[in-house]
Image: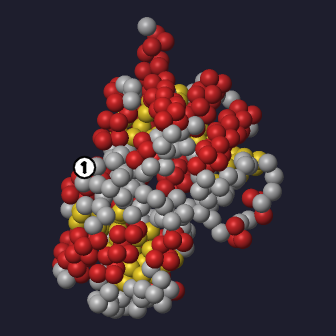
Amino acid sequence: MRLILVSAYFPPEVGSASHLYYELGSELVRRGHEVTILTGYPSYNIDRSSLPAAYRSGRWMKERVNGMDVIRIRTIGMPRQIPILRGLGQVTLAFALCLSGLFLTRGKYDIVLVYSPPLFLGWTALVLRRFKNAKAILNVQDLFPQSAIDLGVLRNSFLIRTFRRIEAYFYRVTNLVVVHSPGNKDHVLSCGGSDSRVSVIPNLVDTRSITPGERNNAFRTRYGINAGDYVVSFAGVIGLSQDIDTVIDAAKLLKRQSDIVFYIVGDGMEKPRLMSKAQGMVNVRFLPMLQKEEYIELLHASDICLATLRKEVKTPVVPSKIMSIMAAGRPLIAGLPLHGDAPKIVEAARCGICIEPENPEALAAAVQTIHANPQLAKEYSANGRQFVERNYSLEVCTTLFQQAFERVLTEDKRGQNT
């Protein structure tokens, strides 16, 4: 098959979208498919000072990455903290990726797989479907606009109605919608999607590159973490939805247990405020966003890993960090809305403790429970690794994507013959 994968982010950018499409695309190439990536120039979660010269100039570029043809186009950088400008930036990105797909690729393709959000990339999929004779598949990872409504970021009734209509339109007209959990499928169906054209494919993790490793490793040496320090880590985007206030408040409750140290690793619009809140706390330390290799080292160096969201997050999101934590064989504490899909996964895997969000007392108690029971921690670690190998490995999930692609193409051929 010839496939186009469209994503706002791609390595060297750090994040779930860039890692997902890099790993999926690489595995598809290994299986004999031709993969083209449409994306922008690196700008998100990167050290700009260390960017290669090729990324610093030009309006567009082509490169070969692990067997994939990567086409990058430069777009207008917009401040992420200003919603209107951020939305405008997403519209211009969708338009730019349309142009790059139309004029910088050759021939016909079988599948266009678009990562959403940004929601507007749905238009990119539809345009490329029309001119590249491909089937358009929308890979929905975050249920926008509902996620923004829940957090209070999106309040204007006109914009809410507009975005909901656009969302429903894409669910109706794309050839297939892929979501990462059953709860997300229910949302798509409630917005006008068709049951026969919505597939659940879990977020994948490369269990070959993320494996259990030594606790006292190079990461601890590099950042001066003593062998006796009991590390509780959160790693990822530090934004409105991640509920890091609760992590800091739990650290305050555990300040007398001097061996327990909380590491908050990543970047985002909330980080400056949170650093100010934690000022003077010796058991809370901040680190910048890490590249994948160092992130894996962090997981190994951690005694407990956290996945937290605010209670306002009512969409059934499953943070991809949960799969990485399980793959690394580390105990997990998930402070997430208990009605969502993520707690069901943690309970099924028996890889950690689920608590209600925004409850520092419950988080502190869960940390103490695992801290006081090394055998329980070992069981959580082993259970998580086994579960993710069976259900979320790169091999398993890529096969599910292949089956979805083949089904879409087969159904189209059947329709042409009737």
The picture places residue 12, in percent across and down from the top left corner, at 62, 61
Q: SS at mark 1?
A: loop
Q: Give the residue number, with chain letter if any, for mark 1.
A: 339
Residue, x 22% and y 79% (percent of image)? 368
Amino acid at circle 1: His
Q: Residues within 10 Å of mark 1 (few under 14, many from 20)?
A: few
Q: Is residue 388 visible?
A: no
* 192 over 185 or under it: above or below: above
Q: Is residue 165 left or right of residue 246?
A: right
Residue, x 29% and y 90% (percent of image)? 256
The picture places residue 259, in percent across and down from the top left corner, at 32, 90
Q: Is residue 369 visible?
A: yes
Q: Nearer the viewer, residue 363 or 73?
A: 363
Quarter of the image where the N terminus is located: top right
* 415 over 4 or under it: above or below: above
Residue, x 38% and y 75% (percent of image)? 248
Q: Is residue 91 left or right of residue 365?
A: right
Q: How many marks?
A: 1
Report which quarter residue 121 is drawn in. top right
The picture places residue 313, in percent across and down from the top left corner, at 36, 51
Q: Is residue 111 left or right of residue 282?
A: right
